[in-house]
Amino acid sequence: MSAAIELAGLRKSFGPTEIIRGVDLEIYKGERHAIIGPNGAGKSTLFHLISGRYKLSGGSVSLHGEEISNLPPYEIYRKGLSRSFQVTNIFPNMSVFENVRCGLMWAQGYKYSFWHLVDRETELNQKTVRVIEEIGLSARQHIPAGVLTYAEQRALEIGIAAAGGADVIMLDEPTAGMSHSETDQAMTLIRKITEGKTLVMVEHDMGVVFDLADRISVLVYGEIIATDTPENIRNNKAVQEAYLGVEAEE
Amino acid sequence: MSETTKTASATVQASSLKRFGPWIGFLILLMIMPFIFTSNSAIFTMNLMGIFIIFSLSYNMLLGQGGMLSFGHAVYFGLGGFMSVHFMNYVEDGSFVFPIWLLPIFGGLIGLIFAIIIGSFSTRRSGTVFAMISLGVGELMAASSLIFVAFFGGEEGVSGDRTMGPESFGADFGPDKEVYYLIAAWVFVTVVLMYLFSRTPAGRLANAVRDNPERAEFIGYSQRKVRFVSFCASGLFAGIAGGLFAVNFEIVTEENLNALTSGVVLLMAYIGGIGFFIGPIVGAIVFTLLQSILSHYTDIWQMYVGVMFVLTVMFVPQGLTGIMMMHTAAYRMNRLGGLVVPYVRMGIPSLCMVAGIAGFLEMMHHVRGAAVGESTMSLLGIGFDTHSVMPWVIVAVLGIAGGYVMRSQAGQLKDAWDTANDPNTWQEEASS
Amino acid sequence: MFELVFFSLLNGIVTGLLLFMLASGLTLIFSMMGVLNFAHASFYMLGAYFAYTISLYLGFWVGLIVAPVIVGLLGALVERYGLRYVHRWGHVAELIFTFGLAFLIEEIVQFIWGKSTMAYHEPEILQFPLFTIYGQNFPAYKAFMLMISISIFIMLLLILTRSRIGLIIQAAIHKPNMTAMLGHNVPLVFMGVFGVGCALAGLAGVIAGPALGTFPGMAVVLGAIVFVIVVVGGLGSLTGAFVASLIIGLMQTFAISLDYSVNDLLSVLNISYDAEGAFRDLWSLSLPQVAPILPYLLLVLILIFRPTGLFGNRET
């Protein structure tokens, strides 16, 4: 198996505090990979480093064998890595339809075109409708995204990230703050949308993680203490001590 | 294809009547306007209106569509004007043969060129920094225009003669009415183009960057480049508006690119409503009307405009168009009729109050400005003596009583509004 | 040459410190509330006009004390009933609101006082040359302006660094939400700071009115310059505002008094030029001529090459 994402000696400090302290990780092409860890372990920071939101303090990130360290987010996106955010991050004054269509625009090759009329681009619009259908928002497509319910906004968040058909998709706590039934729906959606793609996700809900992930990495205080299959992670002594033990008692 | 896909593509490819209807109506309206309003002053006002429509729409490409607050948009308007008036003079002295009606193209070109230069650094950021750069560049250009006399003509500006070009369409563009059609044609073309721009990927992404610049970077777009494209387009259209200004007034001065004009365009767009494509059009029409009508009757019209602007920013940030659009829900439910009486009950005392306040201000202004011994003035054709008590009592009663009654009517208007917009009853009706 | 430099230096410092009285208020307001108050210079103008009207009846010295107080109260009212209301529509709306306010205040001033320059003069007691060097007088009033500005500067410094309220203000600048949680009434602090900022601007107006003229355009003339200062100095940095005020003050007085032109430069370099060409204005450009555009040029250059300003640490 070849690597979709490869992190080598990744470091990030904010002032004197080092949040990511040398992370080496290989995420295989086509796998569903979950990153878990206690609060403040640096999971979101790790996502921001890979996706270009933060500059690296050291080390390197490669996507499909090509180095993408410190590229701006849009360059990384164009190379085939798309992500969602932990705090909902959509275009609030635009309709759901426009939100998704904008997510498709670059992938469909429109760039900064001011000579295409979006309403006339049948293929673009059909694709948009299909994505909206997949995320279950067809009935709400003409409503401004800002007035959707929380769960709907989370679905839209994932939809925008996945719309462009990037082959590596990173989801930052896709089910955070959701009820049980909403979580189940979200999982079905994630499964559907990441079919045949590489998925990297940060998640707190252990049910989701063990159900969905092919492999799990455990991040504790900026270091990865274990990367393995869900079964082995469950039985890993170090992991239980550092993290799962607390969860298991709950 | 599933059911939803079909309905969606049906909405996307709306019937051609629905698509072109408004535009044909707009075109016809532009053509018949001079037959409805035939006086010279009406034509003059409409010419100015057309120029301002283009100018404020171009401004809204920045503020409303792209989230860029500019305090220096007059730079592109003014430069477009200067460029066009210079070319007008080249045509006049025969060094250059070119139809006059195409002159605004040069205005647009210079606007575009300067937008490319200035936009290359100013669009790096939005928000306060963008606003400050635009202000700085605006002041810089305005101050420079008084120094570089050869191009800007100093305090007097540069004047030209639009009738010296070759005749086109059997017109030499001497009379204002012929210029009206020239402007109307440009208005139609540029409004269509600016609307279409908002429907292109660049225009859609401008909205996305306005809403959430960071997220736009994670769907493949550099926020800076998205803003840059809008900025250039906006400069182009502002330049065209400036070119039309030059053709219409045959003179361009420093005032056309200074902070005052930049403020006026912000005011027009905001009063009209920056959240809607037609908002700036409404704003330009209202502002020009206010300017030409109010300035006819009163010296202190600018103060009224200022008050109106501040009140708009405070209480109706969605602008006049926003107020109109608030009624669409009630309109769809066929319930606008229920609002007429409440509006009248609210409107009459409000008008009284405004009349009282305005009357008071006008009288104050008259008393202060009048020559010694002169104490008669007239308001709305009614002459009276400002040194007698009665007029003051009347405006005070109008103002206070109007305000009091207005407040007492606010409750019933709110109730009527809530009933008219109650979504529950609406859904019942819709399903039945 | 020495006299030229000496007087320019002195005048530059007077102007610079005057500008700082405006810029300090603007900076404090910006760093606490995130609002660049476009109407700040309008309060400066109001200070001059109020002081003029008061001086007609009660004399200059009463105006000096009372006018800034009135302006400060007005400013507090604007914050309480205007800005705080508009805040819900976001920062852009706030900026546009203060912009509209600046426009409106100018119109109101014209409505009340008319369009002509007011006969607002320095008090007679200060109408004498303080000293004379090389035949040039230095008016006592300028020394008075200098004194007021310096004492305000020292007071500000002491209040901000030594007093309890100064500490709260500094805390509110850095972490507004945190300060509120610690039990300080942040809205009240905001209103107070806005009011005091406006009062400072008003005071600047009171003392600048007699020297620079009291007319409806005085806000516009100074307003844009003050903006330049806070941006060049770095948004939210008082030190930056101070340094930038002095730089701009000195730059303007020196540019006006040093009468050199491009022409001189060209003749030194032995380059001849076409006196009739389209660029003729460029060749005859002199320093006093370009003085008004220098601040804006500086602003644009700073924003391009150092968007945080000289001492700032934030961009927006």
Image (tube, rainbow, N blue to C red):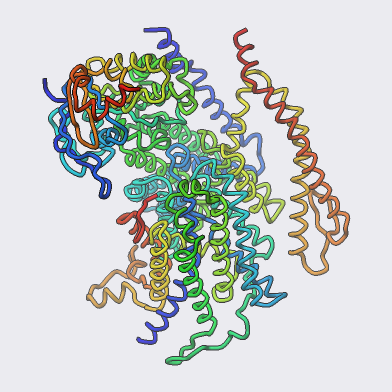
Q: Vertical placement of A184 versus B272: above or below?
A: above
Q: Residue at x 69, y 56 (%)?
A: B299
* Residue situated in front as seen by the camera: B78 or C34: C34
* Residue situated in front as seen by the camera: C219 or B146: C219
Q: Residue at x 54, y 54 (%)?
A: C189
Q: Is residue C76 visible?
A: yes
Percent across and percent down for residue A143 are 49, 23
Q: Vertical placement of C4 versus C67: above or below?
A: below
Count of labels shown?
A: 0
Percent across and percent down for residue A79 are 21, 30
The N terminus of chain C: image quadrant = bottom left
Please give left or right for residue A21 compared with residue C117 in the image: left
Percent across and percent down for residue C163 are 49, 64
Q: Quadrant of residue A64?
A: top left
Q: Residue at x 29, y 27 (%)?
A: A202
* Residue situated in front as seen by the camera: B212 or A176: A176
Q: Is residue A109 visible?
A: no
Q: Vertical placement of B153 versus A25: above or below?
A: below
Of all residues, the one furthest to the front in this rendering is A249
Q: Quadrant of residue A57?
A: top left
Q: Vertical placement of B362 versus C136: above or below?
A: above
Please give left or right for residue B405 compared with residue C177 in the image: right
Percent across and percent down for residue B181 are 54, 38
Please give left or right for residue B331 compared with residue C306 in the image: right
* Residue situated in front as seen by the camera: C143 or A127: C143
